[in-house]
Amino acid sequence: MLRSLEWAVWPAVWYWVERGCWKFADRNDGKGLTKRINGGYNGLGLRLSATKKAGRVLNMRDLPRPSPKPHKKPDPRLKEYQVKLKELSVLLGDPMLDPGKPDGWAGPKTAKAAKAFQSRYNLEPDGVIGPKTRAAIDQAIETVKTVPEREVEIPVDKPVVPESVEEEVKKKTGLWGWITSVLGGGGTGIAALFGMEWQAIVAIGGVSLAALLVIILLRGQIAGAIRDIRTGIESAG
C-alpha cells in the first residue's frame, strides 16, 4: 500500500503536523526537530551537516541553530499569566482553563490550559503563552469583569386566602366598626332625638363608655383570631 506515492506521503504529512514538527522547521531548529521525531539525538551531527549542504544548494539564508536552553529558574511572567488563566477559569466557570498551581514553569497542565484558551478564542492552539495569547488573556479578563451581572427575579408563590375565611374576617372587622360607631355617637344622638335631660345623657354616656371598654378587650381577641387564621393559611400554602 505504501509503495504508491499518495499513501507514502500522507502518513508523513500527518506525523509532521500531529507532532508539531513544523514549529522546529520554521525556526530552522534541527536539534529540536531531531528530538521531536526520534526522541533523542541519534545522527544529529550528520543531519545538521546534510541540512547545511542543502541550505547552500537552495540558497537558504538561515542555517539550523540549536534549540534554546530551558529556563533554570521559574519564569515570573509565565507565573503571572498562570494566575490570570486560573482567575479566568473561575470567572468563566471553565475548569479546562485552570493551569494548576502557578509556579512559573511551562508544564503539561499549563500547556493544556493554554490550548483550551487558544481554541476558545480562535488562536493557534500551540500550548505556548506567547505575546498574542497574553494579550488575549488580558482582553478576556477585562471583558468578563466589565460585563454587569444580571439580576434574576425569582417568582414567589403567594398564599391564596379562601373566600370563606376572607368573608369571616370582613364580618368581624365590619361588626367592630358598626359597634364603635353606634356606641361612640349613638348615645348622644338618641338623647338629642328624645330631648332627655343632662342626667340621663350622662347615664347613657357612662353605659356607652363601659360597653366600649368591654369591646376594646374583645377586640384583642378578635385580632388574635384573625392572625391565627392567616398564619394557618400561609403555613398550609
Image (spheres, grey):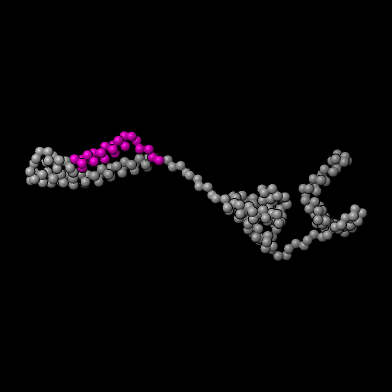
- Whole-percent x and y of residue 131? 71, 56
Where residue 80 sits, quadrant-wise, is bottom right
Query: Which residue does the image show at 64% across and 53% down from the upper left?
Result: 139
Could you say which is closer to the camera, residue 132 or residue 158? 132
Query: Which residue does the image show at 82% across and 57% down from the upper left?
Result: 29
Where residue 36 sits, quadrant-wise, is bottom right
- Whole-percent x and y of residue 191? 11, 41
Q: How many marks?
A: 0
Q: What's drawn in magenta, residue-wise? A: 158-183
Quadrant location, the C terminus: top left
- Image height check: is 25 above or below 69? above
- Image height check: is 192 above or below 22? above
Query: Which residue does the image show at 82% across and 43% down from the upper left?
Result: 10
Q: Is residue 41 visible?
A: no
Left/right of residue 202 with respect to residue 29 in the rendered view: left
Query: Which residue does the image show at 24% across and 44% down from the upper left?
Result: 219
- Image height check: is 151 above or below 81? above
- Residue furthest bottom as drawn: 73
Residue 159 part of the magenta segment: yes
- Whole-percent x and y of residue 161? 35, 38
Could you say which is closer to the camera, residue 103 or residue 189? 189
Q: Is residue 121 visible?
A: yes
- Whole-percent x and y of residue 108? 70, 55
Left/right of residue 231 with respect to residue 146 in the rendered view: left
Left/right of residue 27 with respect to residue 204 in the rendered view: right
Secondary structure mostly seen in magenta is helix
Quadrant location, the N terminus: top right
Where residue 14 sits, quadrant-wise, is top right
- Image height check: is 49 above or below 185? below
